[in-house]
Amino acid sequence: MALYSETVMDHFRNPRNVGVIEDADGVGEVGNAKCGDIMKIYLKIRDDVIEDVKFETFGCGSAIASSSMATEMIKGRPLSEALALTNQAVAQALDGLPAHKLHCSVLAEEAIKKAVQDYYERQGVDYDKSLFPACDSCDHGCCHSH
Ligand code: FES
């Protein structure tokens, strides 16, 4: 069996939603301290729905494929769905990732959550902080943009 599924290769070669949203309503950036890869997600939000989403990923092929798939999965969807998106769902939608590459899909989940959190902060929304990864206590070393 090939290491990477056709879907992973497709999203790696032709990533969807690459770019920057200049007047984004929320931006989330995460990095993985071990591999050094960085992912940035931009959200345009109207009435709690993600109108547009773009990403910049400086990282491995699996991270690029994960960002591409994850942005496709949340585009046009309500914020609640974006927050419920798990890295397992992203990996599944990619028809699987090799075990040692699963952490790449975690970046996508975390970058989206951070972008939503940034939106809530900017809007002064009183949100449930427990829904978001507690960067200070987690040991992933993923969040570096406080
Ligand atoms: Fe770092 Fe994939 S190896 S995100």
Image: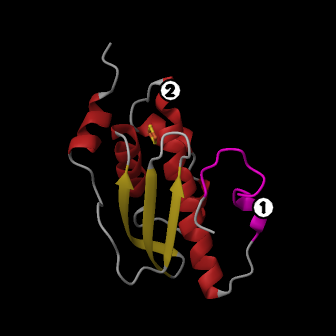
Closer to us: 91 or 133: 133
Quarter of the displayed picture in which ligand 1 can be seen: top left
Q: Position of residue 91 (x, y in %)?
A: 47, 37
Check if residue 95 falls in the magenta segment. no
- Res. 113 image quadrant: bottom right
The residue sitting at 35% across, 43% down in the picture is 65
Is 13 rendered above or below residue 144? above
SS of the residue under disc 2: helix
Q: Quadrant of the N terminus?
A: top left
The residue sitting at 37% across, 61% down in the picture is 55
Give the magenta range: 128-143
Q: Position of residue 23 (x, y in %)?
A: 39, 84
Between marks 2 and 1 in the image, the one whose residue lies nearer the viewer: 2
For disc 1, the neighbor class at 10 Å (few under 14, some 14 to 19, many from 20) is few
- In the picture of the structure, the residue carrying the numbered disc 1 is 130
Say if residue 37 shows up in the picture.
yes
- In the picture of the structure, the residue carrying the numbered disc 2 is 100
N-term-proximal mark, 2 vs 1: 2
The residue sitting at 59% across, 74% down in the picture is 118
Is 28 rendered above or below residue 84? below
Q: CA distance from mark 2 to mark 1?
A: 28 Å
Q: Quadrant of the C terminus?
A: bottom right
Instruction: Kindly identify the amino acid type of the residue bearing the numbered disc 1.
Output: Ser
Name the magenta segment's main secondary structure. Answer: loop
Q: Is residue 77 left or right of residue 55?
A: right
